[in-house]
Amino acid sequence: MIREFYGPFDEEIKKVEKELEHVELVDEVSDVQCEKCGRMMVYKYGRYGKFLACPGYPECKNTKPIVETIDVPCPKCGATVQVRKTKRKRNYYICENNPASCDYISWNKPKKGEKWNSEDTAEFKKETTKKTRKTTKRRTKKK
């Protein structure tokens, strides 16, 4: 049974390896310049999705995440608003100046001309805190 399977399978693998020798994987070049070496960074795919990396890898190990932004300015300071994801893949909106000078963060996408109040941040922090379960101590039997 194994001979019936392995004979044709081995021939198929050798055939495919010969065909793939001329195929070359080329990374997509971005318009972002590497701060460390000056080369144009390329898009790479990793465990957690797409990111920017320097093409001169062994010498330069610079990487950057791809930051998604929206065209609506921050309601508090007017800077760019970024879209980020939680560990559970839920989107939230945060000011690019957070936490340095602005504390805007929200679950809801900001609207143009919207005024922001600090109660929204308290609501965001309340939802993201880890909920703990009450545990009871078990009694141990005395011998």
Image (cartoon, helix red, strand yellow):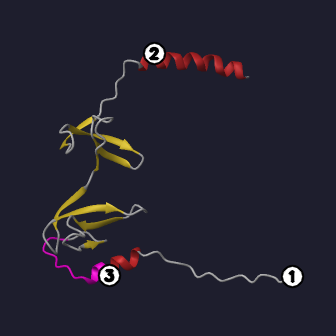
The residue type indicated by label 1 comes to Lys
Tag 2: Cα neighbours inside 10 Å, few (<14), some, or many (≥20)? few
Residue 83 % position (x, y): 27, 61
The residue type indicated by label 3 comes to Ala
Mark 3 element type: helix
The residue type indicated by label 2 comes to Lys
Label 2, label 1: how many angstroms apart (C-alpha)? 73 Å
Image quarter in which the C terminus is found: bottom right
Q: In this view, does 93 lie above or below 141?
A: above
Majority SS type along the magenta span:
loop
Residue position for label 2: 18
Residue 102 % position (x, y): 20, 73
Residue range (magenta): 111-122
Residue position for label 3: 122
> Which of 56/127 is in front?
56
Residue at 19% over, 37% down: 39
Residue at 42% over, 20% down: 20
